[in-house]
Image (cartoon, rainbow, N blue to C red):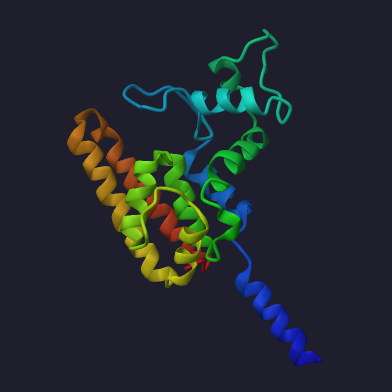
Amino acid sequence: MRAILFIILFFTNFCSGADFKPFFNHVVKVEGSAFTVTRFDRGGATKFGVTFQTFNRFCDLEKFVIECDKDNDKKVTPKDLARLALNDVKPIYKTYYWNVVKGDKIHNQAIAEFLTDFVVNSGASKNKVLQLQKAMGIKQDGIFGTQTIKAINKQNPKVLFKKLYSFRVNFYKKICANDRTQLKFFKGWINRISLLEQIYYHEKFI
């Protein structure tokens, strides 16, 4: 009986997906809490790493999840973004980033987080997902579908993480090569993924 219980617990743990909570804590750490409007930053006004465009879209579609009109002027503006609290952005990260890569279905925490962080930092257009799939050495269809998740879970997490890390370094290099106004962000991008790598190894996610 004990042996059967052990097997059930083992496979339940093995097959369980990654957890959103550590990801949220980590991504907020690398993003910071300041409200910023930085010249040449394609994201524009940002708070806790959430751009005004993303915030405004979330407010249009999920207006009953959080209070968006913080200053009660009956419209959503960057001033409302500046007043966001940490708990306000949690459902935004869950809906628009974590769920996009199906983080709950990816077995390894570090892989789920690193993929989601890429979406946070760079978006999830079909072309970018195709690039990610190519870097991971899996079938390219441009979506985080069932087959992609299965292919991710079959790979050695440490080997896969190295592939994704190299991909992100080269991805940022290409951005800067194509648009020199983005060079000012390169060091920050590299620091971002380096800090995440340190966190993952420290917390034994990889």
Label total for image: 0
> Looking at the image, which residue is at 36% across and 27% down?
42
Q: Is residue 177 above or below residue 41?
A: below
Frontmost residue, 147 versus 54: 147
Residue 106 position by quadrant? bottom right
Vertical position of residue 194 compared to residue 60: above or below: below
Q: In this view, does 33 lie above or below 25?
A: above
Q: Position of residue 199 (x, y in %)?
A: 48, 59
Quarter occupied by residue 133: bottom left
Q: In this view, does 56 lie to the left or right of 115?
A: right
Residue 202 location (% of width, % of height): 49, 65
User: Which residue is depicted at the point 42% across and 23% down?
Assistant: 44
Determine whether 204 is above or below 121 in the image. below
The residue lying at 63 percent from left, 67 percent from top is 16
Q: Between residues 102 and 168, which one lies in front from this camera angle?
A: 102
- In terms of depth relative to the viewer, which is nearer, 189 or 132? 132
Give the quarter of the figure containing the N terminus: bottom right
Residue 67: % across, % down? 71, 24
Work out which residue is located at the far right of the displayed protein and give it: 1
Res. 165 visible in picture: no
Classify residue 180 by image quadrant. Answer: top left
Q: Extreme top residue here? A: 73
**Does residue 183 appear anywhere in the picture?**
yes
The structure residue drawn at horizontal position 51% and vertical position 23%, both measured from the top left corner, is 52
